[in-house]
Amino acid sequence: MENPHEQQQNALLSRIVANVVKLNQVVTDLNERLEDINKHNNDIALIAQMWTTYGASVQIHLESTDNFSEPV
């Protein structure tokens, strides 16, 4: 005669294992998406840095050529 508690524990363990497998897959997918987002964010940060540097260069050029005027 089989132990009903053992059957119940085995069923619970099977559900836990199945849920952990699903969780692992979801976390893996999430990590892949976060890597993509970080890659795009790095591109945006690089463009922002280039824009800031360009603005500073323009400012220096305008001031050195006396073409600089205050905004209206």
Image (cartoon, rainbow, N blue to C red):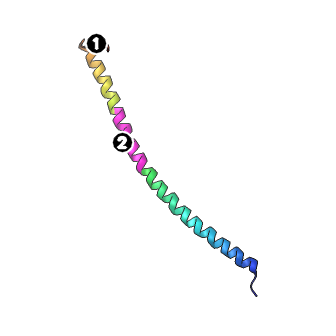
Q: How busy is the neighbourhood of tag 1: few (under 14 within 10 Å), some, or many (20 plus)?
A: few
Amino acid at dot 1: Ser
Q: In which quarter of the image is residue 45?
A: top left
Q: Residue at 36%, 37% (x, y): give it.
A: 46
Q: Mark 2 points at which residue?
A: 43
Q: Residue at 39%, 47% (x, y): give it.
A: 39
Q: Residue at 76%, 82% (x, y): give it.
A: 3
Q: Which residue is at the front of the view, 67 or 19?
A: 19
Q: Distance between the residues labelled 2 and 1?
A: 33 Å
Look at the magenta stretch and give its main secondary structure: helix
Would residue 55 appear left or right of 7 to someone viewing this image? left
Element at badge 1? loop
Mark drawn on residue 69: 1
Would residue 29 appear left or right of 12 to someone viewing this image? left
Q: Residue at 55%, 62% (x, y): give it.
A: 23
56 is higher (above) or lower (below) than 18:
above
Looking at the rendered image, the disc whose residue lies closer to the viewer, 2 or 1, is 1
Element at badge 2? helix
Which residues lie in the magenta part?
36-49
Q: Are marks 2 and 1 in contact (CB under 8 Å)?
A: no
